[in-house]
Image (cartoon, rainbow, N blue to C red):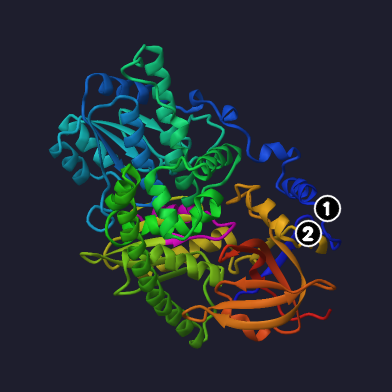
Amino acid sequence: MTAIRIRRIPDQDAPIPARHPDELLSVLYAHRGLSDPAEAAPGLGTLAPVTALYGMEAAVNRLVAAIRSEQSILVVGDYDADGATGSALAVRGLRDLGARRVSFLVPSRFSNGYGLSPAVVEAACGQGADVILTVDNGISSHAAMARARELGLSVVVTDHHLPGDALPEADAIVNPNQPGCGFPSKHLAGVGVVFYLLAALRGRLRESGWFGTDRPEPNLAERLDLVALGTVADVVSLDRNNRILVEQGLRRVRAGRACAGVLALLQVAGRDPARATAADFGFFVAPRLNAAGRLTEMSLGVECLLTDDPDRALAMAQQLDALNRERRAIEGAMKEAAEAVLDALILDGDSLPPGLCLFGEDWHQGVSGIVAARLRERYHRPTIAFADAGDGRLRGSGRSIEGLHLRDAIDWVDRRHPELIEYFGGHAMAAGLTLRPGCLEPFRDAFVEAVRVQLGDIPPTPEIRSDGALPAELLTLETAEALRFAGPWGKDFPEPRFDDVFEVVEARLVGDDRRHLKLRVAPPGGAVIEAIGFGLGERIEAARGAVRLVYRLDVNSYRGRQSLQLLVDHLADPVEM
């Protein structure tokens, strides 16, 4: 197990200087760079302006013409939760704005690959589409754009992925990360880009007198539940703009104004919509939605988010829940196989390389990214897990660590060895690629070298951030409740963690696979508190006497009774009191 360093922010030994939850929140926001607590989740009126997105005018012009002339608009989304929510938002939003002919298509991960391809364009033409609107993809689809021009189709790209050296020849491109775009929030998820496009469309249609008694102007804010879900699911940075979108969406969910599909997904996950948080979206709803794209194809997820029939939404949510259980079983088997490969490396006397590339002949393409993430977490190495993509090709999903830009590392390989990679794309922390036949070993060597260029031979020691020691008087249910709704918490605006020494009163393994560590602990001079460490079962031997815990506060609800619970993220070796 990789050693972890606990880093307090700020670096101080004294407990956090707060006596009440409100004082605590002020301190925690300051740790995250906010001097004014109101800035944690400002209102919709302070969103970055639509006009700051480069390419928006051309996109609006083409879509307004399509709406007015009743042309067929086909939404082509990605097969993850961001793509699914963005596709549902685009279809719902365009219909709300008066578009008469709107449909969607989600390419299959297995037969079509990622994003807009020439084959998908041909399928769109066969369906009678006049305009293709991409969601969460398209920025690298050069061949598809050429095919669309040949067939006489217009393409409007909405995406947020990093572009390559050249942009595709689309009718319009809206992407905050394209050259020349001055939009201040470079971390918009794909669904966020769609929301901005719909807002710009509504503004243009309003100016032209499109809305009236027979065609009321829609309140697009009522669709923010989809924006919040997709933004959280894609693990983009919760900068100021994204916090607004997520918090405003969560408020609508808690008020019972979410679409039927979101409510159904919360229900099958056992989460209360009235108490929904970003963590509920990220850890409970998103995996169920993603399961469709990982194991079959994402149309089921999009349809779940499009229906207004609660019974139909629940039936589809239950199907997604079953797929998620299947996904977890496949993932567990793949993770065991990957661990065996790594154990063999260690038994051979080799130290782990700075970057890991693993392949399993019977691994599932749809789950390889999750396996890469699990191994990344365990060994603190950027990891790419490959599965068979047919015809000798391998398709890989990679996850990175802080300090290594994964897409740039793959690009470094591609520039020096252009014969290895057929396609790649992604972000700093996650990327995907397809290798040509017989290229795994040379790619592995080149990838290790690319990691060395950025990080050196040994990756930096992983850190777990702590806000410090929580005063004993704030270890209460009231504090846990205040923190629960004080976010939204997420990437780059992390949920508060604390660390301190506790005396272990009881430790036992729980869960069907006995992977989780259930504890009863007591702070110095304090009452016993229930705690649980998910996935920390292997640390049970260390859970005795005085231990240092890094934890979050949680509200445990059981049979109508609520109590304080600690969610343990890390259990350090025993220490003296």
Looking at marks 1 and 2 on the same chain, the residue that comes earlier in the sequence is marked by 1
Q: Residue at x 38, y 43 (%)?
A: 136
Q: Which residues are magenta?
A: 398-419
Please state which of residues 331 and 567 is positioned toward the viewer in this rendering. Answer: 567
Please state which of residues 397 and 297 is positioned toward the viewer in this rendering. Answer: 297
Image quarter hosting the C terminus: bottom right
* Mark 1 neighbour class, 10 Å CA radius: few under 14, some 14 to 19, many 20 or more: some
Numbered tag placed on residue 18 in the rendering: 1
Q: Determine whether, in the image, residue 332 is placed left or right of residue 461.
A: left
Residue 175, can we see it? Answer: no
Image quarter hosting the N terminus: bottom right
Residue 247, can we see it? Answer: yes
**Mark 2 secondary-structure assignment:** helix
Picture coordinates of residue 249 (x, y %)? 51, 40
Q: Nearer the viewer, mark 1 or mark 2?
A: 2
Q: Is residue 333 above or below residue 355?
A: below
Q: Is residue 433 magenta?
A: no
Q: Is residue 428 above or below residue 127?
A: below
Q: Determine whether, in the image, residue 436 is placed left or right of residue 508.
A: left
Which residue corresponds to mark 2? Answer: 474
Q: Residue at x 56, y 58 (%)?
A: 454
Picture coordinates of residue 70 (x, y %)? 22, 23
Q: Are marks 1 and 2 in contact (CB under 8 Å)?
A: yes
